């Protein structure tokens, strides 16, 4: 969807002509007679501000519907509630840490089996499926090593056993990737990240391809009640107005940062799908609209937690914090932060080294970001020299 279409998919208020979407801060709606209303009866079931957000996101993803939740994990949880005991999920192995925790520590207990496979090789998915497989769960690119899976090829594997293909599209955003056009059935977003874009809210979104799935997710949303409130719905809508321009700038900054890191003495591996050296560069180029995202991860030659700690506390513009996708650049150390709930052995298996650092590039001037990183590398050098003396 073009920037023009995105901006103008957000309606002005038909009642007053207000150009921005009103915040309907209300719990209930007056009825003319029992069951006779203006389309809204109770704010868990529906709210006009949330409805605008949901309609805009459905259009952004090109789906039948979309549903807004209090956080990304609440959105993921709503999709998992489609399952019953005995069902199986095949999930990408370096899945978001919070999703791993929910799958393994909540849903496995309820009798749902989860198999984690390296989905960058379609054969691994084909080998793991069975008639019990109900969901295939992808993130592409993944967090934090930015693996990219072939969504279209995996959708064909899902169809063989009638499983639904779910794509967590948080990292690509609807600007870079349209999973429905590649065969996905459900698209997830942590609205907290690029869609919100200003590090000022938490939100989650589920977009559905078919009417049948829309009805099921709508039912779960109302039954479980993990909805997004009107104020955060408003902020998320406001974020979407600038999503296109923000995301493109973040991609541009990330490309420059990745190329800079490649030349740094202290750096071991650089993970960024926009580099020709990235092992999934080809498929990323094919399915991501020529955009490779704003996240860059790297590991240090001195592959220790201590070296990573020195680096992540030495930057000025890159602020040390969880989360990503906002206008301000952030950095984090996944082994101690976002992925602390994933056991070390599993982290290593997924390629998350002890010194792995994740950068979320904001929309600052790229020269300032590069200078900031260079200063932090100098700090590591002087720390190492001091320790050697
Ligand atoms: C942050 C994130 C989530 C969880 O979203 P919250 O809004 O933090 O609950 C899920 N998936 C991915 C890829 C994320 O980055």
Image (cartoon, grey):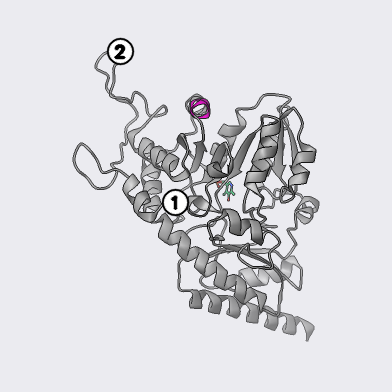
The residue under label 2 is: 34
Q: Which residue is farthest top? A: 34
Residue at 68 percent across and 64 percent down: it is 278
* Residue 43 in picture, x, y percent from top left: 38, 29
Q: Is residue 146 visible?
A: no
- The reply to whether dot 2 and dot 1 touch (C-beta < 8 Å) is no
Q: Nearer the viewer, residue 63 or 181?
A: 181
Tag count in the figure?
2
Badge 1, how many Cα within 10 Å: few under 14, some, many 20+? many
Q: Which span is picked out in magenta?
A: 211-216
223 vs 7, nearest the viewer: 7
Q: Quadrant of residue 159?
A: top right
Q: Which mark is residue 213?
A: none
Task: Tell me if 136 is positioned left or right of 228 in this view.
Answer: right
Q: Main secondary structure of the magenta part?
A: helix
Q: Residue at x 27, y 19 (%)?
A: 31
Q: Secondary structure at mark 2?
A: loop
- 60 vs 34, left or right, is right
Magenta-drawn stretch contains 213: yes
Residue beneath disc 1: 196
Up the image or down, 101 lies above or below 367; here it is: above
Instruction: Pick whichever, 144 or 168, lies toward us.
Output: 168
Please identify the quarter of the rendering in which residue 17 is found: top left
How far apart in space, not on screen, are marks 2 and 1 (Cα)? 37 Å
Question: Can you say which quadrant of the picture contains the C terminus?
Answer: bottom right
């Amino acid at each position: 969807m073009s920037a023009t279409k995105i901006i103008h998919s957000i309606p002005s208020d038909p009642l007053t002509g207000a150009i921005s979407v009103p915040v309907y801060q209300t719990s209930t709606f007056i009825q003319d007679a029992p069951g006779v209303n203006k389309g809204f009866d109770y704010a868990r079931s529906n709210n006009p501000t949330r409805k605008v957000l949901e309609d805009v996101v459905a259009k952004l993803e090109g789906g039948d519907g979309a549903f807004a939740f209090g956080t990304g994990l609440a959105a993921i949880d709503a999709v998992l509630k489609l399952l019953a005991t005995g069902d199986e999920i095949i999930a990408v192995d370096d899945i978001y840490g919070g999703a791993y925790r929910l799958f393994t520590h909540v849903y496995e207990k309820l009798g749902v089996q989860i198999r984690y496979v390296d989905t960058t090789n379609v054969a691994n998915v084909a080998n793991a499926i069975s008639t019990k497989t109900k969901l295939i769960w992808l993130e592409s690119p993944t967090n934090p090593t930015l693996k990219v899976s072939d969504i279209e090829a995996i959708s064909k594997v899902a169809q063989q056993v009638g499983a639904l293909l779910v794509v967590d599209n948080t990292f690509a955003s609807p600007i870079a990737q349209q999973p429905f056009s590649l065969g996905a059935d459900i698209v997830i977003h942590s609205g907290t990240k690029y869609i919100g874009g200003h590090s000022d809210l938490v939100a989650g979104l589920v977009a559905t391809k078919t009417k049948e799935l829309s009805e099921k997710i709508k039912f779960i949303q109302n039954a479980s009640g993990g909805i997004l409130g009107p104020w955060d719905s408003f902020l998320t809508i406001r974020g979407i107005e600038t999503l296109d321009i923000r995301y493109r700038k973040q991609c541009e900054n990330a490309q420059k940062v990745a190329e800079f890191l490649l030349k740094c003495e202290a750096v071991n591996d650089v993970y960024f799908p926009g580099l020709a050296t990235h092992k999934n560069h080809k498929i990323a180029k094919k399915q991501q609209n020529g955009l490779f995202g704003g996240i860059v991860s790297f590991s240090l030659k001195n592959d220790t937690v201590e070296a990573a700690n020195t680096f992540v506390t030495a930057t000025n513009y890159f602020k040390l914090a969880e989360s990503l996708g906002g206008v301000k650049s952030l950095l984090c150390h996944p082994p101690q932060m976002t992925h602390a709930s994933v056991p070390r052995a599993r982290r290593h298996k997924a390629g998350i080294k002890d010194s792995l650092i994740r950068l979320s590039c904001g929309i600052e001037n790229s020269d300032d970001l590069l200078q900031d990183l260079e200063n932090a590398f100098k700090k590591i050098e002087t720390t190492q020299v001091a320790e050697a003396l």
